[in-house]
Image (tube, rainbow, N blue to C red):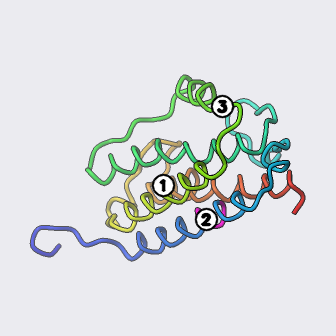
């Protein structure tokens, strides 16, 4: 502690760099999709199942899903940073999110811009976290620490969807 303020963690800084890279890699790939690829069918990575199996939809919807999924993670991380217990995801939350994500044709440029902005926002929030905050068991996604939750629900989410998108597009 310095002057009553906890010092940010070097682990937080390293996690922030991973968030920035995963977000940039995903946004860069999504930005390069042509319109046929954007409207083409997305596939999910069969190695990862969370909740009910997804029905394949347009790749643009999958990219949009990633973009708007930042907001709940930012709320969770913000609660942790403020030393509050974050809310857990419920089956109702997931069902509501799926319904909200059922947009027909999200705008590619706006979606990519949102991924870039939210990736930076998440990285900045995580970079300021202390070791104590990163080690806190949140209960958001099982008995996981904040750091594990960041890897699973933020960095892992980006990487998993990038793999799925590349598989669907074939490049």
Mark 2 or mark 3: whose residue is earlier in sequence? 2
Between 156 and 65, the one nearer to me in the picture: 65
Horizontal side, residue 80 vs residue 54: left or right: left
Our reading of the magenta stretch's main secondary structure is helix
Which tag, 1 or 2, sits closer to the chain's start?
2
Locate the C terminus by quadrant. Answer: bottom right
**Helix, strand or loop at mark 3:** loop
Q: Quadrant of residue 23?
A: bottom right
Q: Which residue carries the number 3 mark?
A: 103
Q: Residue at x 37, y 60 (%)?
A: 125
Q: Nearer the viewer, residue 165 or 90?
A: 165
Residue 107 placement: quadrant:
top right
Q: Is residue 134 left or right of residue 22?
A: left
Residue at the spot x=33%, y=66% of the render?
A: 128
Q: Identify which residue is drawn at 85% across, 48% down.
A: 36
Which residue in the structure is indicated by mark 2? 22
Q: Quadrant of the N terminus?
A: bottom left
**The residue tagged with tag 1: helix, strand or loop?**
helix
Does label 1 or label 3 sit earlier along the sequence? 3
The answer to whether the residue labelled 2 contacts the one labelled 3, judged by CB atoms less than 8 Å apart, is no
Q: Marks 1 and 2, Cα distance to the nearest angstrom? A: 12 Å
The answer for how far apart the CA atoms under marks 1 and 3 are is 19 Å
Q: Mark 1 against mark 2, which lies toward the viewer?
A: 1
Q: Which image quarter: residue 136?
A: bottom left
CA gap between label 2 and label 3 equals 24 Å
Q: Residue at (42%, 73%) from the top-left corner?
A: 13
**Would you place residue 17 above or below residue 49 in this image?**
below
Q: Is residue 153 above or below residue 92?
A: below
Q: Which residue is mark 1?
A: 118
């Amino acid at each position: 502690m310095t002057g009553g303020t906890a010092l940010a963690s070097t682990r937080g800084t390293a996690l922030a760099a991973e968030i920035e890279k995963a977000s940039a890699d995903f946004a860069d790939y999504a930005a390069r999709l042509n319109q046929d690829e954007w409207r083409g069918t997305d596939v999910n990575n069969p190695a990862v199942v969370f909740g009910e199996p997804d029905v394949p939809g347009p790749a643009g919807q999958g990219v949009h899903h990633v973009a708007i999924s930042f907001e709940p993670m930012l709320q969770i991380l913000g609660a942790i940073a403020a030393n509050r217990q974050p809310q857990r995801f419920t089956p109702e939350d997931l069902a509501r999110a799926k319904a909200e994500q059922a947009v027909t044709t999200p705008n590619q440029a706006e979606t990519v811009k949102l991924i870039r902005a939210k990736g930076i926002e998440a990285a900045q929030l995580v970079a300021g976290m202390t070791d104590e905050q990163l080690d806190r068991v949140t209960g958001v996604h099982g008995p996981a620490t904040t750091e594990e939750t960041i890897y699973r629900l933020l960095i892992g989410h980006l990487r998993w969807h990038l793999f799925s998108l590349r598989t669907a597009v074939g490049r």
